[in-house]
Image (cartoon, rainbow, N blue to C red):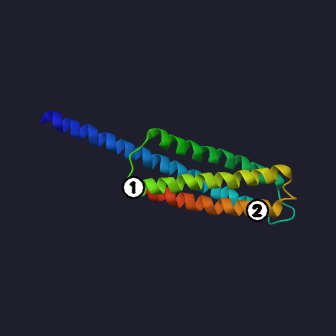
Amino acid sequence: MKISMRLCGVLLLAASSALALDKEIAGKMMEASQRLETDARAISVALKSKNAAVDEVHKRLAQMDADMAKLQESVSEVEASELEMSARDKRDWELLKTKVKLLEVFHTNKKALAAEDVMKNRTMIRAHADGVALRAMKLRQTAAGLQKS
């Protein structure tokens, strides 16, 4: 009886720590996507003016690079841990991974346009920044759903 109680305790502890890891990673992803959204919106606002602060745009892009790296690292961490998820959570996880990839595409395109000439590509960079902000918000919502599970 004692052995089975201990075994149950160990299994419960293992299951709860796996769940906590999932919630921790979801929290990291929510924070990174919030920062991405904030920086993308700041770039969009900065580029409304014809006298945009190019240095500010490049500074925000560098910050966004770090947040994209954190998102990708979090995805890799979850993939490597092979957490057991319910069917709903697996579907949400796949959706979240797709959103991270899409966000990466938008961010990469925005960076490429900014590297060429910020003022020349101001309208396109702004459109991409708006797209990143929207997708970062949706990513955060999906991560919040996984965190609640």
Q: Are marks 2 and 1 in contact (CB under 8 Å)?
A: no
Mark 2 — residue? 126
- In the image, is 7 to the left or to the right of 24? left
Q: Nearer the viewer, residue 45 or 13?
A: 13
Compared to residue 148, the image places residue 11 above or below, namely above
Residue type for callout 2: Arg
Residue 60 in sight here: no
Q: Nearer the viewer, residue 20 or 106?
A: 106
Residue type for callout 1: Ala
Residue at far top of view: 3
- In the image, is 41 to the left or to the right of 10? right
**Which of the image's four quarters has the N terminus?**
top left
Give me the C-alpha separation between circle 2 and circle 1: 38 Å
Q: Quadrant of residue 34?
A: bottom right
Q: Residue 13: x percent and y percent? A: 30, 40
Q: Residue 103: x percent and y percent? A: 64, 55
Could you tell me which secondary element the residue under label 2 belongs to? helix
Q: Quadrant of residue 48?
A: bottom right
Characterize the local packing of mark 1: few (<14), some (14-19) or many (20 or more) Cα atoms within 10 angstroms: few
Of the two numbered discs 2 and 1 in the rendering, the one whose residue sits closer to the viewer: 1
Residue 82 in sight here: yes
Residue, x 54% and y 50% (percent of image)? 29
Could you tell me which secondary element the residue under label 1 belongs to? helix
Q: Quadrant of residue 18?
A: top left
- In the image, is 62 to the left or to the right of 74? right
Q: Nearer the viewer, residue 49 or 149?
A: 149
Mark sitting earlier along the chain (2/1) = 1
Residue, x 32% and y 39% (percent of image)? 14
**Which of the image's four quarters has the C terminus?**
bottom left
